[in-house]
């Protein structure tokens, strides 16, 4: 509701600005034609106001283009969330109906339960993503802070990602200072969500062969950087600054088949800002993999 009201006020402001500029310019031109078309002062003022009008129309056009893109991204988000919610619900319903209408062996029953639990986890993950996106939407610092060992968080998230995506041991490698404590101050659940989103993103965009390296490195005495490097589809230079925007998703090739809500990387950047850090990505281009970095201040700093 707050976002809708803000967008409505912005739209009204742009419309009022454009209307005022056009009326003033029209009045000036009429006055100039009626009174004295040779007047240098009126000519200069008319030229200036005409330039202002053009600038206003240009700003209005930029605003409208941004609104159109934002609406398209929101529509894509709604479609993605609808799919992420509807698919597991339909699957759970089907298995429950099967259990209700047929006699199945204990082995089959166990398989059905495992599938339904996996679908429940998928539902819970989607809900958690949406809730966390709303929670981290502001730039305020976390209300409840605690000492969090980022190295431990990285190890736990890496193990969970390997289990969730059924990855081989050699698919995910931990390097650097990951075995040494790296204590930061913040919300542990938010930090876990940020690291988990980076790993999930790396797996999804790696294709059939998953090779991920998680690296913890010190940046001087005051900061720690967690890097997630993959050998996936890579990112073009035009998309490097866009991938962290809310609802934005890379298009083309493998990316079109990747399921998700488009919130993961925006959550990563929001969590980084809330903890006094930053998040960024590096890639040499399409097909050359990418490296996402979550940089945070150490507690000792």
Image (tube, rainbow, N blue to C red):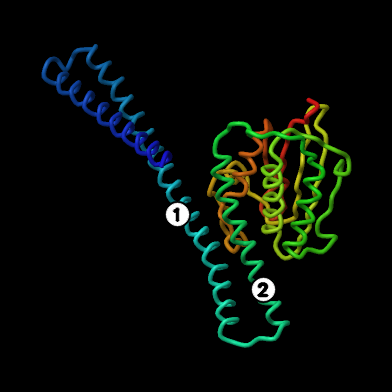
| Residue 113, disc | 2
Between 30 and 3, the residue placed more toward the observer is: 3
Write the residue at 42% across / 49% down: 71
Q: Is residue 149 above or below residue 105?
A: above
Write the residue at 29% across / 22% down: 49
The quadrant in which residue 46 appears is: top left
Q: Which residue is mark 1?
A: 75
Regarding mark 1 in the picture, which secondary structure is present there? helix
Between 83 and 89, the residue placed more toward the observer is: 89
The quadrant in which residue 186 appears is: top right
Regarding mark 2 in the picture, which secondary structure is present there? helix
Q: Is residue 133 above or below residue 82?
A: above
The quadrant in which residue 180 appears is: top right
In the image, residue 58 lies at what x, y percent?
Answer: 37, 34
Mark 1 to mark 2: distance in Å?
33 Å
Going by the image, does 298 lie left or right of 194?
right
Write the residue at 79% across / 51% down: 156
Picture quarter with the N terminus = top left
Write the residue at 57% across / 59% down: 252
Q: Is residue 254 above or below residue 216?
A: below
In the image, residue 207 lies at what x, y percent?
Answer: 70, 62
In the image, residue 184 lies at what x, y percent?
Answer: 76, 34
């Amino acid at each position: 509701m707050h976002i809708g009201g803000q967008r409505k006020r912005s739209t009204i402001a742009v419309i009022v600005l454009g209307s005022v500029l056009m009326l003033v310019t029209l009045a000036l031109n009429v006055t100039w034609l009626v009174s004295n078309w040779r007047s240098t002062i009126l000519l200069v003022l008319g030229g200036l106001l005409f330039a202002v009008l053009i600038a206003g129309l240009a700003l209005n056009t930029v605003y409208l283009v941004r609104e159109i893109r934002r609406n398209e991204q929101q529509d894509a988000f709604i479609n993605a969330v609808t799919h992420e919610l509807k698919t597991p619900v339909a699957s759970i319903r089907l298995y429950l109906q099967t259990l209700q209408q047929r006699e199945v062996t204990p082995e089959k029953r166990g398989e059905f339960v495992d599938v339904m639990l996996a679908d429940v986890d998928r539902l819970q993950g989607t809900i958690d993503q949406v809730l966390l996106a709303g929670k981290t939407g502001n730039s305020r610092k976390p209300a409840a802070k605690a000492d969090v060992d980022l190295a431990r968080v990285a190890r736990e998230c890496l193990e969970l990602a390997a289990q969730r995506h059924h990855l081989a041991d050699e698919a995910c490698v931990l390097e650097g200072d990951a075995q040494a404590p790296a204590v930061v101050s913040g919300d542990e659940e938010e930090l876990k969500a940020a690291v988990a989103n980076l790993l999930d993103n790396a797996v999804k965009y790696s294709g059939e062969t998953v090779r991920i390296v998680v690296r913890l490195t010190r940046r001087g005495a005051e900061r720690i950087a967690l890097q997630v490097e993959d050998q996936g589809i890579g990112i073009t230079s035009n998309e490097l600054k866009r991938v962290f925007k809310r609802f934005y998703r890379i298009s083309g090739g493998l990316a079109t088949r990747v399921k998700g809500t488009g919130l993961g990387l925006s959550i990563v950047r929001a969590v980084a800002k809330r903890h006094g850090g930053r998040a960024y990505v590096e890639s040499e281009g399409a097909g050359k993999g990418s490296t996402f970095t979550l940089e945070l201040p150490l507690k000792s700093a």
